């Protein structure tokens, strides 16, 4: 994989472009938003397809159920709000009317994690992946950059079934190929290695990429895999890699409980127990600060990945 | 269909409700009995539907959503009697492996059910979404939703109540089963609903009231509401019903909200209801 930075862009803008493109490709794509059209970058879709855009006001529960009702008739509804309000606030609505009823609703969730920044813990959800992956029938996608979020949005629109699509607020390095086809459930090999496997998702993918040359200098040949689909997890790719490296670091902007690391640990415990370290928030809430400050404060930064790798490699020996 | 014919069907539906709930010794007979006349009138007289060719998408036909899913015995009986699935399947209600789950679901593929309900407060929103889909599709058919009165205590109801008039969702007829009782007791005591009519009117709905256990009144009101669709406003029908209607000892109390009759009580109840279409 070429890690050349094409530009710095926010993943939510990738969603906005993807939604617009999905709307152009399929007249059945519709969108709902609970008073966060600007934040979710849904304005272009709303402008081009006003009859297919539904401003719900600040009423997330009503939004989710209306989307389920509309999905019945063959439409492909996306609901847009912050991840905190897209999941925890409407968990019961998603559980009964989307997941259990298996409706073709796409839950688009922006501003996930501590990189939401200054608004603080009320808005910085770190439990959403866990909540969503526990629901039967739900697919959980956490793309890593602008291009991938756009392509994931297009893939979600084509996929028939409930999808949780999680992305974020800040501008981050955009490096994945512009028109790379996003395959739901297929892990993305970013760099092959032999000494340790790093499984990362979302904003932590770039942090892990930054760790690679540092590790190389230390003589550690790391394999890096982007798990952009938390569920269904690409178990085959996980086991194939770990069979080779025999130790693992996971990295995510989420609680340890219920996150990517949790999913990987379950697969390994059942199939291939080995030393493992998790770079994640450890059972605490976020707080106000800049995204960069918060990533450092909650130990979600490149040096944290490097430390975790050193530790797990030592445990292996 | 004549009023007499509808009343005969409703009697059979009430027999089914008693036998289903008695059969598995669980379920919600009170609300089921009270709402029977309304839903019978919808499915056997008012709605334009094609039960033999059930379409999940509901395109080209009327749609009904049961928001208060716990009165599933009534819903299942009417769906079966209308031809969505075999009547004999009613005997499987709430039993392991059944398509007739305690609360309605799509997971087992029961024809006639389009979305799960049971957790209260969601059905009105679902119906609003389905009604908007019909508008996008240029489909002139109507979406109906039945809610409980206790269910009006859920906050989400008022999100949908605010949305539908604001967005001109006028192909929607919502009905409240206004029996003034819920599990813990009279709604006045549990959480006073206040003036529901005034509340919905203030939100912008066109509100009708009817005697929900008088078949003639039910049919007349539903007919009027249907003719009044596509006029810019959603409609709400406050259906004054009696929980347990048709079985004397189940009326006038909330005690039969979620309690099954024993053998003796079931026999007593059935003796008060005429068998008209043949028991399952």
Image (cartoon, rainbow, N blue to C red):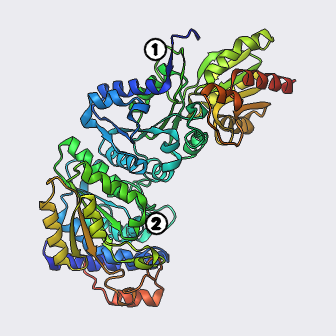
Quadrant position of residue B197: bottom left
Residue A276: image location, x then y, percent: 77, 31
Q: Which residue is mark 2?
A: B102
Q: Which residue is mark 1?
A: A178
Residue A126 position (above or below residue B18): above
Residue B256: which numbered mark, if any?
none
| Discs 2/1, front | 1
Residue, far right = A317
**Residue at (20%, 54%) from the top-left corner?**
B171
Residue B133 position (above or below residue B79): above
Residue A98 position (above or below residue B172): above
**Residue at (46%, 61%) from the top-left corner?**
B119
Q: Is residue A317 left or right of residue A37?
A: right
Estimate how packed mark 1 is, as few (under 14), some (14 to 19) or many (20 or more) residues with alpha carbons within 10 Å: few
Q: Observer-nearest residue: B74 or B161? A: B161
Estimate how packed mark 2 is, as few (under 14), some (14 to 19) or many (20 or more) residues with alpha carbons within 10 Å: some
**Residue at (54%, 43%) from the top-left corner?**
A132
């Amino acid at each position: 994989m070429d890690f050349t930075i094409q530009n710095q862009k926010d993943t939510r803008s990738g969603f906005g472009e993807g939604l617009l493109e999905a709307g152009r490709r399929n007249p059945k794509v519709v969108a709902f938003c609970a008073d966060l059209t600007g934040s979710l970058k849904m304005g272009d879709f709303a402008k081009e397809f006003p009859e297919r855009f539904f401003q719900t006001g600040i009423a997330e529960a009503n939004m989710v159920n209306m989307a389920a009702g509309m999905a019945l008739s063959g439409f492909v509804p996306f609901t847009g709000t912050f991840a905190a309000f897209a999941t925890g606030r409407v968990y019961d609505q998603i559980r009964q009317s989307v997941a259990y009823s298996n409706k073709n609703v796409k839950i688009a969730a922006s501003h996930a994690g501590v990189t939401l920044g200054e608004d603080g813990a009320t808005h910085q959800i770190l439990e959403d992946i866990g909540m969503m992956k526990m629901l039967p029938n739900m697919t959980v996608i956490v793309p890593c950059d602008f291009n991938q979020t756009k392509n994931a949005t297009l893939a979600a629109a084509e996929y028939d079934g409930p999808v949780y699509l999680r992305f974020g607020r800040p501008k981050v390095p955009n490096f994945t190929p512009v028109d790379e086809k996003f395959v739901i459930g297929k892990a993305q090999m970013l760099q092959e290695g032999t000494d340790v496997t790093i499984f990362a998702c979302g904003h932590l993918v770039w942090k892990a990429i930054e760790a690679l040359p540092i590790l190389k200098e230390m003589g550690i040949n790391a394999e890096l895999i982007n798990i952009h689909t938390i569920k269904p997890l690409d178990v085959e790719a996980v086991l194939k890699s770990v069979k080779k490296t025999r130790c693992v670091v996971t990295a995510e902007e989420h609680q340890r409980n219920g996150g990517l690391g949790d999913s990987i640990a379950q697969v390994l415990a059942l199939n291939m127990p080995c030393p493992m370290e998790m770079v994640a928030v450890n059972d605490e809430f976020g707080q106000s600060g800049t995204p960069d400050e918060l990533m450092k404060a909650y130990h979600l930064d490149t040096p944290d990945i490097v430390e975790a790798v050193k530790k797990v490699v030592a445990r292996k020996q | 269909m004549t009023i007499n014919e509808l009343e005969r069907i409703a009697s059979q539906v009430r027999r089914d409700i008693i036998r289903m709930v008695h059969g598995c010794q669980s379920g919600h007979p009170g609300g089921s009995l009270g709402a029977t006349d309304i839903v019978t009138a919808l499915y056997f007289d008012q709605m334009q539907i094609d039960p033999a060719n059930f379409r999940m998408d509901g395109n080209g036909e009327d749609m009904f959503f049961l928001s208060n899913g716990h009165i599933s015995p009534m819903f299942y009986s009417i769906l079966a009697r209308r031809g969505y699935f075999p009547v004999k399947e009613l005997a499987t209600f709430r039993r392991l492996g059944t398509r007739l789950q305690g609360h309605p679901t799509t997971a087992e593929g029961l024809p006639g059910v389009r979305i799960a309900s049971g957790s209260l407060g969601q059905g009105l929103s679902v119906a609003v979404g389905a009604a908007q889909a019909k508008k996008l599709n240029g489909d002139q058919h109507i979406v109906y939703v039945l809610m409980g009165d206790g269910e009006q205590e859920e906050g989400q109801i008022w999100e949908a109540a605010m949305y539908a008039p604001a967005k001109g969702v006028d192909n929607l007829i919502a009905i409240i089963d206004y029996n003034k009782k819920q599990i813990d007791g009279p709604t006045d005591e549990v959480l006073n609903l206040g003036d529901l009519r005034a509340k919905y009117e203030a939100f912008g709905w066109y509100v009708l009231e009817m005697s929900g256990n008088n078949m003639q009144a039910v049919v007349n009101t539903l007919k009027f509401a249907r003719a009044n669709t596509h006029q810019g406003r959603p409609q709400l029908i406050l259906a004054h019903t009696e929980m347990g209607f048709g079985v004397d000892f189940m009326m006038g109390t909330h005690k039969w909200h979620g309690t099954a009759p024993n053998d003796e009580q079931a026999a007593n109840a059935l003796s008060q209801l005429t068998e008209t279409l043949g028991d399952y």
